[in-house]
C-alpha cells in the first residue's frame, strides 16, 4: 500500500476548506429557501440570460454531450466498469462510495426545497424532478475530482495520467455550467452543487489519505 500523498497538515487545511464550502452552500441554501422562497435570484436571471445568449446550432450538441456525462445512468455505468476492473479497490470502490455520499446530501435537499426548474420551454434536454441543488454539479465534482486524485496516486503511466486528469478536470468544471446552458438549472443550483461536491471531495480525499497512512504504518 502506498504512503500518504498529502501531509497531515495538508489534510487539515483541506478539511477547513471543506467546512468553508459547506458554510457557503448553507448561505446559498438560506438565500434560495428563506429569502427568495425558491424563486430565482436576480443573479440567476442575469447569468441565465448570459448563458442563453451563447446558444448556437454548433455549440448546443457539444454542451448536451458534456451534460450527459454526469447523468445518473452514465455515472452508474462508469462506476460499474471501474468496479469490474481488477484494481477495483483503487478506483471503483472509492469513487462509487464518494458518489453515493454526494447523493446522500443532495437528494434529500431536492425534496425539502422543492424548487421548480426553469421553464420547460427553455430546456435543451429532458429533465424531471426538482432543481435545487444541481445533482449533476455535485456528482461531477466528486466523481471526476476524485478520479484525478486517484490517477495521480496510482497511475504509473505519466502521459496517460496527464491526459485522463485533464479530461476529468475539464468535466468536473464544465458539467455544472452546462446545466445552466441547457436550461434545466438555475445558477444558484450549480453554485450550491459545486460547494457540496467540493466539500465531499475534500473530505473523501482526507479519509483515503488516513486509510493509506494507517495501512502503511
Image (cartoon, helix red, strand yellow):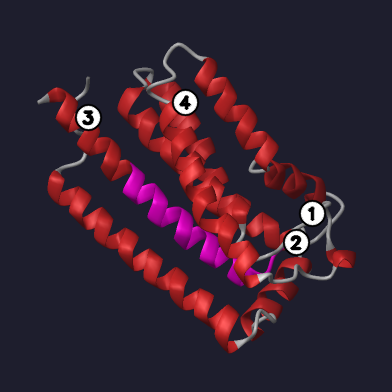
* Image quadrant where one finds the N terminus: top left
Name which of mark 4 and mark 2 comes first in the sequence: 4
Residue 35 pos. (x, y %): 57, 88
Q: Residues within 10 Å of mark 3 (few under 14, many from 20)?
A: some
Q: Which residue is mark 2?
A: 184
- Write the residue at 54% across / 16% down: 84
Asked which secondary structure carries label 1, the reply is loop
- Write the residue at 47% across / 26% down: 92
The foreground one among 211 and 146 is 211
Q: Residues within 10 Å of mark 4 (few under 14, many from 20)?
A: many
Label 4, label 2: how far apart the Cα atoms are? 29 Å
Residue 100 pos. (x, y %): 50, 42
Name which of mark 2 and mark 3 comes first in the sequence: 2
Label 2, label 1: how far apart the Cα atoms are? 7 Å
| Label 4 close to label 3 by CB (< 8 Å) | no
Q: Which residue is mark 4?
A: 92
- Write the residue at 63% across / 43% down: 70
Label 3, label 1: how far apart the Cα atoms are? 40 Å
| Label 2 close to label 1 by CB (< 8 Å) | yes
174 above or below 96?
below
Asked which secondary structure carries label 3, the reply is helix
Which of labels 4 and 2 is toward the front? 4
Q: Which residue is mark 1?
A: 127
142 relative to 156 in the view: left or right: right
Asked which secondary structure carries label 4, the reply is helix
Asked which secondary structure carries label 2, the reply is loop
| Label of residue 212 in the image | 3
* Magenta region: 184-204
Q: Residues within 10 Å of mark 2 (few under 14, many from 20)?
A: many
217 relative to 11 in the view: left or right: left
104 relative to 14 in the view: left or right: right
- Write the residue at 42% across / 72% down: 24
Amino acid at each position: 500500500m502506498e504512503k500518504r500523498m498529502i501531509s497531515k497538515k495538508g489534510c487539515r487545511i483541506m478539511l477547513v476548506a471543506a467546512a468553508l464550502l459547506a458554510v457557503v452552500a448553507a448561505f446559498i441554501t438560506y438565500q434560495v429557501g428563506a429569502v427568495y422562497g425558491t424563486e430565482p435570484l436576480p443573479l440567476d436571471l442575469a447569468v441565465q440570460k448570459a448563458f442563453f445568449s451563447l446558444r448556437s446550432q454548433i455549440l448546443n450538441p457539444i454542451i448536451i454531450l458534456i451534460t450527459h456525462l454526469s447523468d445518473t445512468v452514465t455515472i452508474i455505468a462508469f462506476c460499474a466498469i471501474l468496479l469490474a476492473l481488477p484494481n477495483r479497490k483503487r478506483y471503483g470502490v472509492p469513487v462509487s462510495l464518494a458518489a453515493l455520499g454526494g447523493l446522500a446530501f443532495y437528494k434529500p435537499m431536492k425534496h425539502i426545497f422543492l424548487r421548480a426548474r426553469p421553464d420547460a420551454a427553455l430546456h435543451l434536454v429532458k429533465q424531471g424532478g426538482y432543481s435545487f441543488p444541481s445533482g449533476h454539479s455535485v456528482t461531477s465534482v466528486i466523481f471526476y475530482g476524485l478520479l484525478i486524485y486517484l490517477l495521480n496516486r496510482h497511475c504509473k503511466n505519466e502521459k496517460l495520467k496527464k491526459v485522463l486528469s485533464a479530461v476529468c478536470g475539464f468535466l468536473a468544471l464544465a458539467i455544472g455550467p452546462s446545466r445552466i446552458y441547457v436550461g434545466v438549472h438555475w445558477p444558484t443550483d450549480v453554485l450550491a452543487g459545486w460547494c457540496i461536491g467540493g466539500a465531499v471531495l475534500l473530505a473523501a480525499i482526507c479519509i483515503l489519505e488516513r486509510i493509506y497512512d494507517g495501512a502503511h504504518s
